[in-house]
Image: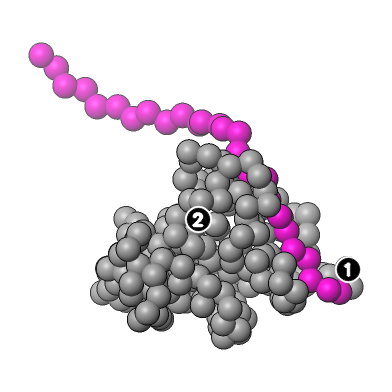
Amino acid sequence: MSLESGRFISAVTKNVGYQYYIYLPEGYEATSKKGLPLILFLHGMGQRGDDLEQVKKNGPLYRVEEGFEFPFLIVAPQCPDNHWWDSDNLIALLDYIAGDYRVDCERVYLTGLSMGGSGVWALANSQPERFAAIAPISGFFTPVDPWRFKGLPIWCFHGAMDDIVPVNDSLRMVAWIREHGGIVKLTVYPDTGHNAWIQAYNDPSLYGWFLEHKRSL
């Protein structure tokens, strides 16, 4: 009997992609080469599929449909049916957008709701250095390496009356990251259910908070 050791390394390639909407604010064409800040928004489970109009139902693009004007580029991809957010796909999308549009890469922000809130945790865990700040809303508890969030500004939102994703999921995430040196701002709406994103995205202070943060390239 013999016992041998070895090491296997191989490259794997895959096709990635999402359909998406992008919001360009008034005056975008006159933007300097420095570019504009960007928000990447991840929708929830109910907006999956191939009808791109669904991504306007909640979040920042819903505000745009109401006539609200943002000082950001906003990218809102759509996750296909029966899939969850894929971090490789999302990073590839960010790279594509940064190459085709005037993006200030020091001010890229990440937010999402419900399934998208969980996607925020997963994507930030994958590449925390890509983001200046993140805001997960009503997200599922998501296994991450809590050390990777140290130094990343986080504002987490949840409804105390949420009967779909219990508020304890966000409380556990916040406690876990704080225990490992992360600084997390937490807002729990006491009389709100799963749709805490309505209050969060209607609050101008969220967007002002985003703009307070930038990362060093």
Where is residue 187 shown, x and y percent of the image?
40, 80
Q: Nearer the viewer, residue 200 or 33?
A: 200
Residue 22 seen in the figure? yes
Where is residue 110 shown, x and y percent of the image?
55, 65
* Magenta stretch in the rendered image: 1-27
Which residue sits furthest top? 1
Q: With respect to residue 217, does 208 lie above or below?
A: below
> What number is the disc on residue 44?
2
Q: What residue do we see at 41% from left, 66% from top?
A: 194
Q: With respect to residue 67, does 125 lie above or below?
A: above
Q: Which amino acid does label 1 sit on?
A: Glu
Q: Which of 178 and 20 is in front in this view?
A: 20
Quadrant in the rendering for residue 125: bottom left
Residue at label 1? 29
Q: What residue do we see at 56% from left, 74% from top?
A: 201
Q: What residue do we see at 50% from left, 31% from top?
A: 11
Determine whether the residue tagged by mark 2 lies in a helix, strand or loop.
Answer: loop
Quadrant in the rendering for residue 103: bottom right
> What number is the disc on residue 43?
none
Q: Nearer the viewer, residue 28 or 166?
A: 166
**Magenta stretch: residue 136 in it?**
no
